[in-house]
Image (cartoon, rainbow, N blue to C red):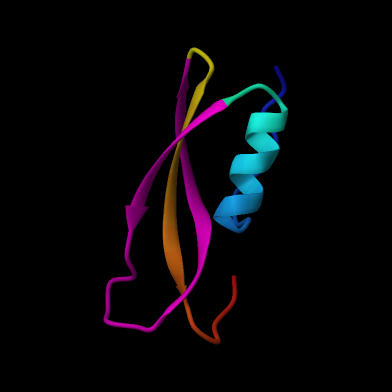
Amino acid sequence: MTLPDVLGLPLEAAVKSLQVNGWQVNVQYTNPPFPAGRGAVRVVRVNGIEGNVVYLTASYEVAGKGV
């Protein structure tokens, strides 16, 4: 199986891309280090692979900042 590059993608698009390529996905969430409005959820880290499971960390982007 090919692992698509999902770093920085919106979480929903990343999960769909991985699942279409045969991967199962496990998502852990984190927050910015300061209080902020919650924008889109993006993949900020690919933590590793175990079998056919990809472990991702996702975070809410700070509204107006982008990636």
Tell me residue 9's x, y (percent).
63, 56
Q: Residue at x 32, y 65 (%)?
A: 31
Q: Is residue 63 visible?
A: yes
Q: Residue furthest bottom?
A: 64
Look at the image and give the residue range highlighted in magenta: 24-50
Q: Quadrant of the N terminus?
A: top right
How many numbered tags mark residues here?
0
* 46 relative position to 7: left or right: left
Is the residue 54 above or below the residue 1 in the image? below
19 relative to 65 in the view: left or right: right
Is residue 42 or residue 20 the one in the foreground?
A: 20
Q: Is residue 5 visible?
A: no
Residue 60 quadrant: bottom left
Relative to 5, does residue 11 appear above or below in the rendering? Answer: below
Q: Residue at x 70, y 35 (%)?
A: 4
Q: What secondary structure prevails in the magenta region? A: strand
